[in-house]
Amino acid sequence: MTALAAISVFSLNAVAASAGPQAEVLHWWTSGGEAKSVAVLQQQFAGRGGAWTDMPVAGGGGDAAMTALRARVLAGNAPTAVQLKGPAIQEWYEEGVLADISSVAEAQHWADVLPASIAGHMKCDGHWCAAPVNVHRVDWIWANADILKQNGIEMPTTWDEFNAAADKLKAAGITPLAHGGQSWQDATVFETVVLGLGGAEFYKKALVDLDHDALTSDTMKAVFDQMRKLRGDVDANFSGRDWNLATAMVMNGEAAFQIMGDWAKGEFLAAGKEPGKDFLCRSTPGNGYLYNVDSFAMFNVEGDDKKAGQDLLAELIVGPSFQETFNLNKGSIPVRSDVSLDKFDSCAKTSAADMASSSADGSLLPSYAHGMALRGAQAGAITDVVTAHFNSDMSSDEAVQMLADAVANSM
Ligand code: GAL
């Protein structure tokens, strides 16, 4: 009797569990800081009775994750929720595979708490199709505080100052720039140089509007000259290195600087490092702000348990408690305008203030390197040229010609 009772209680529980919210979540958050951040969502989801199936696909910037996604959708077996950003959301929507999450968005009043520019990325034909997680800033330089102090170097405010600091460090036998030679990392550095040397209007013309004159201009040649200079600032083993290993080089005193989005701050923080003391942050030289908003899109799936999982995930992601805890770990700032920054560090506060001022003066710009500005084919065409230039002795004249051709062929 007792055994039977136990069995029936067990099976009741099993039924109850399987009827609860379910989610298989595809993402690329596998580094120390990233894993700590996504764990916040897993915990909150489990705390509300959800069953989470993790589908992490390692690879910074998400290229490998996007390949895995395509294979799953082609096989007719889309994950429930997917880390997806910018124009890629619209591309998947056009394939007819995204779920409508408007009922959650409306019940939670997303329109009142999200900046209009960000809400625009989350909507497909007027309805909500993705839930935004954060605002990452891409145009940052991170530095090892001790190295700069020991070498009498201030955080650079112009590219000339950066170059002078790099030369001084090299003469002292120190690697100036920690870099991982992966194409998305090359693109990340490249876009900060485009913004820095060209300014906001040039950035927009070149990397958002794909204007032929901007792509072949003397300014763009100067950008490639600067990329060539930076190529000389990296160590011999940079090829293929993951971004978080480059961050670790700065942490461990093996290199002075890294140019990377503020997910790098998530790594410093996860390792117990303090901003202003162990490491320094400053926006890359120039005026403007390159934003990179992470978000999750829900795919069309069968089953009430999965649909409940999508609704719960969407609700949690934009909820104020998740927005605070997640972003404290991730290095980004909350996407909601009503979350207090009291617990955030000085880099995050700078990010929020600069985002507001750049939004006011028109220099708040989408990151092309992180899939916010262009469709995949165009972004990929640019990145191929940036990487080909960085890893060869191609001249800046050849590079701008190749850039214009690659963009034209990708249209
Ligand atoms: C970005 C993403 C960030 C961070 C980074 C490195 O594209 O938006 O959240 O994960 O890649 O993986």
Image (tube, grey):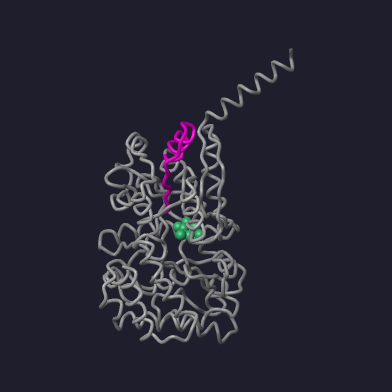
The part of the chain drawn in magenta is 294-314
- Which residue lies most toward the front here? 75
Q: Nearer the viewer, residue 57 or 47?
A: 57
Q: Residue at the spot x=30%, y=66% of the render?
A: 208
Q: Where is residue 168 in the image (x, y as percent from the top left)?
A: 52, 85
Magenta stretch: residue 313 in it? yes
Q: Nearer the viewer, residue 197 or 125?
A: 125
Quadrant where the image shows the C terminus? bottom left
Q: Which residue is drawn at 56% across and 30% down?
A: 18
Q: Is residue 13 left or right of residue 45?
A: right
Q: Quadrant of residue 244?
A: bottom right
Where does residue 362 sit, x and y in percent of width and height?
Answer: 26, 63
Tell me if I can see residue 336 in this picture.
yes
User: Percent x, y for residue 35?
Assistant: 57, 52
**Residue 103 shown in magenta:** no
Q: Which residue is drawn at 33% across and 41% down?
A: 110
220 displayed left or right of 175: left
